[in-house]
């Protein structure tokens, strides 16, 4: 049962097909863009939460929960931020059959909601740094087309919000978030370009935004995480002041950052294939599925071996399941769990029991590995590690194919329409050139590297004037 | 710094004071009843989630996430259910500056949202049972007074929803949920009365509702968990049908159940005292706080001992923190962590280091325990277990004081106004008698025991006619 649409020839159709058939999302709801995240998809999110939550707690973040309701008087306090989000805010105006006196929005992000409280909490430098994290649902009633997991009207996310005494500390905090996300994406086997977004693509109200982009199979990139240095913009708007060591009042320095359930879409897009989803063992809800191969008269010995192997793996902390149903053939089950993306399958038949072995089959490359019965736990863990490593290497290999250099507009016209992907080039810094590039190629200036300063290797790709920066261009989701 | 309001003389004021001062909730938001759950309160919820989520997964529940949006056409499909919730549903009618064609509600519970999907998922008996669990926020814009954690317009909960082939299996599922909740409440040291609610107090659309009530210090009870047998009411409304083994179409049998962040309020109410919150070790965010007693010239040895004990406890899986600040006195810190509810304090001063000991101080009863340095891990775990056990026993003792028998209306008039609490009596079953009792005493018929069938020990408490059941009466939050 291979998927009908080819991943590389028609990625958008393949994506929609795999999201549905791998039982990640059910989109047959009555509100467009507000879908059901099914158990096979939600499990990925739970594992992402576990990995990320631990890193956030280890770096001193405290979890809390703030209301979903965004009173309009709050949103109006930071004009630039308000303008950025106003068109997609959903407004509650009625309760039962009564009209509310003043309408209440649903959070498109929690800066305004949180910072109106931070203002009450922070009095002195001794109250800082404050590092708050929230796991919640977010409502952005996007007017553009929705796309399952990639652009939903309701999605789940984490948002980190921190407050500091100095600009330096806030800048360091942004880097702490960047490093946490690097570790997370490494565990998800997602490759990334880390850039500072150009001014015109900065988060509304921020000083600057750092973003992670990953290329999808059609050569367009997907933003998978962002961290913003908010400077003192919000602390001025929301009056977040502290008494410094000299007894003087200062405005605090702030940051915010987040990743969303969009990551599930990224994982599907990067690792999936014609047979369905392929999940990295690190986040797969089920890492190993054991399938018995029954033969007449041999059912019992097989069932017993399956149960033993299941228990051993479970005791060793492997997320393992069995499928003992006898109204489906082994072949049907193989296809089914390949479709669902389970990283490793264990087959046990009567001959395997006789020989004292089991058969491991990798989801990512189909490799069959015969393993001695008494080595099954050690070997399973080893193979899961190998799968994890392979997925990461393969994805970074693909990433590197997508990244190439272009010197001028003629070269761009020659190469980009065919290759797409991420173009490394030079830019003068003017918004006009960015707009012209967008008009002609549908690409955006994604930004400049943050981990090293790159010197321009030529003039601006569009106007030919002196370049200010090496930038990365790509079409984006 | 004892609390200003007495827990037993003025419970409502004590409650509001402890919720705020123990840093559980900040209610200075602009939307009444939609408050901030602060880190010290959210940590309790996270631990409740861990305990409950494991039990749900171990019994075959799968987690998923459904949209917050409730289209009105769905809510209208089950008339009784709709009527029950309609007055408190918040409606989104606008996005940005545009009016929606049809208004969309925010979930007051997810039956309608989920069951419109279950209808698409379930075709055959082989698809059943289906056991889905969701962790999410819930919006009930109550028109009655809000009360922090006990009656919020937005709160967090889990909701289990199951689908079965037979009525028997659905009834068993309700009992599975009841048993899971018993284990949970035992871990929270919350005592409970488990009753089947009378018909007039059944969940809208359910066949019957099982509920857990716990008495609060003022003698009123709080519902802390419910499990509903929905019968075929929703499956008929939402067309959830399956093909049985004989090839015939049948309507499925359903259940739903949930507990909410109200549990944090229950824990505070039952265990708290004049010094502040008292959290059971099972769910306390921090179980042990280590406080150094610095003396001039001895700072370093104390700091080293604190660090070592901290590391040992942490490695042993204890949730432990230190407070090394030198701008607060030990006495101030003692008060502070007692206010916050941390179950156990460890004090380490220079004399303790000399003697090779540490001092454990129990939050629940103030007991000081001198422990040899090399026994600190074992002793800490032992004392935490003792605290857990004591809290449970004390709470059940209190529960038993609140429960008493009343034979007739004269006895009720004599005893109830002074004693309040839970009254065991007899009831004929008529709604009129229930209404009269409510009018005179502000009590409700909470229901009949489910774990044993009780024979009436006299006539109906109100009308004096033959009683149908032994019932429990109480005033309720």
Image: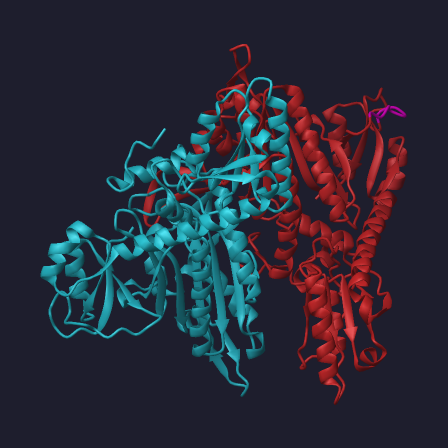
Chain colours: A cyan, B red
**Magenta region includes residue A338:** no
The answer to whether B100 is drawn above or below residue B359 in the figure is above
Instruction: Report the side of A89 relative to A475 (left or right).
Output: right
The answer to whether B417 is drawn above or below residue A69 in the figure is above
How many discs mark residues in the rendered view? 0
Q: Which quarter shows the N terminus of chain B?
A: bottom right
- Quarter assignment of residue A7: top left
**B294 or A376: nearer the viewer:** A376
Instruction: Report the side of B170 relative to A86 (left or right).
Output: right
The answer to whether A428 is drawn above or below residue B421 in the figure is below
Q: Which residue is drawn at 71% across and 84% down?
A: B300
* Image coordinates for residue B78, horizontal then vertical, percent: 52, 26
The boundaries of the magenta stretch are B453-460
Q: Can residue A286 be seen in this view?
A: no
Magenta portion: prevailing SS class: loop
**Magenta region includes residue B458:** yes
Instruction: Report the side of A384 relative to B324 (left or right).
Output: left
Q: Residue at x 40, y 47 (%)?
A: A267
Instruction: Report the side of A97 relative to A33 (left or right).
Output: right
- Quarter assignment of residue B445: top right
User: Which residue lies most toward the left here?
Assistant: A410
User: Which residue lies most toward the front here?
Assistant: A355
């Amino acid at each position: 049962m291979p998927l009908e649409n080819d991943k590389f020839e028609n990625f958008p159709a393949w994506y929609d097909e795999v999201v549905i058939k791998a039982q990640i999302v059910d989109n047959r709801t009555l509100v467009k863009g507000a879908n059901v995240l099914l158990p096979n998809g939600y499990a990925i999110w739970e594992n992402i939460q576990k990995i990320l939550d631990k890193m956030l707690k280890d770096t001193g973040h405290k979890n809390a929960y703030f209301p979903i309701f965004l009173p309009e008087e709050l949103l109006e306090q930071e004009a630039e931020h308000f303008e950025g989000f106003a068109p997609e805010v959903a407004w509650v105006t009625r309760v039962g059959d009564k009209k509310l006196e003043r309408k209440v929005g649903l959070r498109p992000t929690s800066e305004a909601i949180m910072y109106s409280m931070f203002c009450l909490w922070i009095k002195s430098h001794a109250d800082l740094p404050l590092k708050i994290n929230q796991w919640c649902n977010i409502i952005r009633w996007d007017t553009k087309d929705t796309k399952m997991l990639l652009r939903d009207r309701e999605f789940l996310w984490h948002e980190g919000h921190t407050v500091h005494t100095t600009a330096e500390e806030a800048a360091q905090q942004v880097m702490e978030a960047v490093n946490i996300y690097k570790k997370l994406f490494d565990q998800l086997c997602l490759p990334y370009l880390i850039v500072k977004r150009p001014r015109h693509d900065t988060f509304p109200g921020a000083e600057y935004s750092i973003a992670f982009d990953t290329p999808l199979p059609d050569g367009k990139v997907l933003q998978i995480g962002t961290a913003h240095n908010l400077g003192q913009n919000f602390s001025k708007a929301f009056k977040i002041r502290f008494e410094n060591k000299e007894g003087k009042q200062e405005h605090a320095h702030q940051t915010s950052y987040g990743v969303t359930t969009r990551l599930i879409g990224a994982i599907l897009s990067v690792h999936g294939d014609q047979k369905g989803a392929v999940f990295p063992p690190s986040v797969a809800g089920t890492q190993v599925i054991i399938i018995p191969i029954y033969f007449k008269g041999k059912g019992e010995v097989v069932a017993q071996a399956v149960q033993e192997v299941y228990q051993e793996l479970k005791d060793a902390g492997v997320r393992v399941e069995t499928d003992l149903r006898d109204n489906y053939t082994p072949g049907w089950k193989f296809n089914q769990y390949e479709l669902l993306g389970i990283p490793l399958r264990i087959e046990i038949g009567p001959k395997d029991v006789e020989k004292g072995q089991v058969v491991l089959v990798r989801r990512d490359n189909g490799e069959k590995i015969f393993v001695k019965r008494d080595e099954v736990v050690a070997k399973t863990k080893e193979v899961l590690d190998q799968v994890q490593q392979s997925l990461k290497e393969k994805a970074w290999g693909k990433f590197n194919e997508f990244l190439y250099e272009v010197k001028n507009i003629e070269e761009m016209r020659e190469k980009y329409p065919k290759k797409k992907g991420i173009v490394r080039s030079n830019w003068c810094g003017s918004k006009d050139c960015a707009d012209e590039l967008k008009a002609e190629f549908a690409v955006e200036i994604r930004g400049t590297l943050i981990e090293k300063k790159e010197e321009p290797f030529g003039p601006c790709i569009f106007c030919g004037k002196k370049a200010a920066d090496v930038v990365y261009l790509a079409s984006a989701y």
